[in-house]
Image (spheres, rainbow, N blue to C red):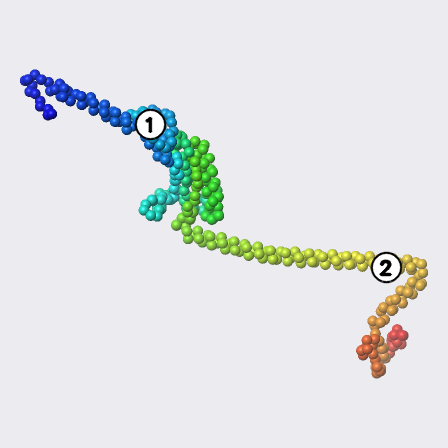
Amino acid sequence: MSYRPYPASEGIDPIQDFLRQYGKILIIAPIMIAVLAAVFTSYYIVQPEEEAVVKRFGRVIAINQPGIHFKIPFGIDTVQAVPTARVLKEEFGFRSIGGEGRTQYRKERTHRVESLMLTGDLKVIDVEWVVQYRISDPSKFLHRARDPRQTLRDNSEAVMRRIVGNSLGSDVLTEKRVQVSTMARHELQDLLDSFDVGIQISTIELQDVTPPELVKPAFNEVNQAEQERERLINEAEKRRNQVIPRAEGQASQIVAEAEGYRAERVNRARGEAGRFTSILQQYQLAPETTRRRLYLEMIDTVLPRAGQIYVLPEGQMSPLPLLNLGRDGQPDQPSVQTAPASNANVRATQSR
């Protein structure tokens, strides 16, 4: 059917003629469109690793699990899907580029702002780490913070800078990497729980901890100097462990010898004192006998040590020894002294 306008002279209104021909279509078409819109907007599908937050006029009325669900159409009910079963991650200091084959990593100048940190011993290091997390409560994740992802990044960077700033650079570079990761995970989780944003931290992993490129030569020199210092300290400790025990042993030996010598002298002195006391007691009982006995004992001790002594006047020949044997069978060497004639008789008398 084609539309043919009537001339105005015939007295028929063109609008009335159009409505008479297409009026039903104009009424049915919007109804069909509304019905189709209602059909296509009255259901939604939640993926296996997601949960759907259903809001009616902005108010949360339900959190639905994976599957097909129905809602009031025409925008009365709105749905936001949140990946609660998926492990999400945030990268700091670098960005990974997913592609065919192996994952590539890109690090730009803007990424260094996140990773450059000052340690407790005033060293600058480049720390790269990854935060893996899950969304534990989708409603809180959507409504407790304006940008929960940026909130997570800001708090993670603050926690990591505080921990690295309280640690030595050598510890973060070597042996305390796992400890730093564990401390950062606990502290970040406490912060997020205080904000109640519905995020559960899975792990925090330190990817690469290195000195900045510009200071690597100086850093290597410092490490070599520290290693040399440790070597010298170890050698000094080794020498100390050798010398000190030896000196302590020698000192103990000297002290022991001195103690033994002291005990010997004290005992000897006590013995001599006791002997003198006993002699004194005997002397008081019999003075003359004791005096004579002491004299004889002294003569018996001293004279055998003197040997044979010949006293000759001046100008005379020494006597000729015949079969001159000592006590041990060896020739005895007499001691010959020449004295003036005036003293000869005196010395001969003393010899007798």
Which image quadrant is residue 333 in? bottom right
Question: How many residues crowd mark 1 within 10 Å: few (<14), some (14–19), many (20+)?
Answer: few
* Residue 315 visible from this viewpoint: no
Left-right relation of 98 to 36: right
Kind of residue indicated by mark 2: Arg
Q: Position of residue 312 (x, y in %)?
A: 85, 79
Q: Position of residue 256 (x, y in %)?
A: 72, 57
Earlier-in-chain disc, 1 versus 2: 1
Q: Which one is in front in this view, the residue at disc 1 or the one at disc 2?
A: 1
Which image quadrant is residue 298 in? bottom right
Kind of residue indicated by mark 1: Phe
Left-right relation of 30 to 322: left
Q: Quadrant of the N terminus?
A: top left
Residue shown at 32%/45% (left/top)?
99
Q: Give the SS element for disc 1.
A: strand
Question: How many residues crowd mark 2 within 10 Å: few (<14), some (14–19), many (20+)?
Answer: few
Q: Which residue is mark 1?
A: 70
Q: Position of residue 301 (x, y in %)?
A: 85, 68
Residue shown at 37%/33% (left/top)?
66
Between 200 and 126, which is closer to the camera in this rendering?
200
Residue shown at 88%/74% (left/top)?
351
Q: Give the SS element for disc 2.
A: helix
Q: Which residue is mark 2?
A: 275
Above or below: residue 191 compared with residue 173: above
Q: Quadrant of the C terminus?
A: bottom right
Between 65 and 268, which is closer to the camera in this rendering?
65
Above or below: residue 177 compared with residue 139: below
